[in-house]
Amino acid sequence: MTVRSGPDGVWVVDCAGEFDLDTTEKLSAACDRDDVAGTRLLVVDVAGVAFAESSFLNVLLRLRNSRSLVLAGPLPSQLERPLVKTGTLALFTVRDSWPPAA
């Protein structure tokens, strides 16, 4: 996972690999850093997520409720399935890539 600043006050968190309770806590801590927490828009790039348990989904929901959030993808099936099953997919703005194509 990497965190980088983008143009116009946007922060991007690139997620890759498996996200269980331990790795999800690292994502939460990275997004709660002072410089990232006050961002106008947070983009979480989930294209490289190979596995995501419920703790990952909980962090995404918390982030969505605390700031503007975009999930950049394409959305992997390992994440799309739980979002659909829980009825939470519609709560997120999902883009196939970031930055969006002009």
Image (cartoon, rainbow, N blue to C red):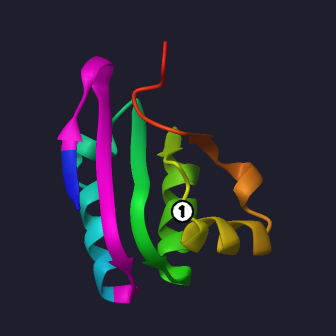
Q: Is residue 22 above or below residue 69?
A: below
Residue 78 in which image quadrant: bottom right
**In-image side of 91 versus 55 (left or right):** right
Q: Which residues are magenta?
A: 4-21
| Three-letter amino acid code at the position of disc 1 | Pro
Secondary structure of the residue carrying numbered label 1: loop
Residue 24 in which image quadrant: bottom left
Q: In the rendering, at what x and y percent does residue 32 appear?
A: 29, 57
Which of these two is toward me, 68 or 97?
A: 97
Which of these two is toward me, 19 or 75?
A: 75
Q: In the rendering, at what x and y percent does residue 86 appear?
A: 76, 73
At x 43% / y 56%, what residue is drawn?
46
Q: Is residue 6 above or below residue 49?
A: above
**In-image side of 38 versus 52 (left or right):** left
Q: Is residue 19 visible?
A: yes
Q: Is residue 86 visible?
A: no
At x 39% / y 85%, what residue is drawn?
20
**Residue beneath disc 1:** 76
Majority secondary structure in the magenta region? strand
Q: Is residue 28 above or below residue 67?
A: below
Q: Is residue 6 above or below residue 27?
A: above
Residue furthest toward the top?
Answer: 102
**In-image side of 45 versus 92 (left or right):** left
Which of these two is toward me, 75 or 6?
A: 75
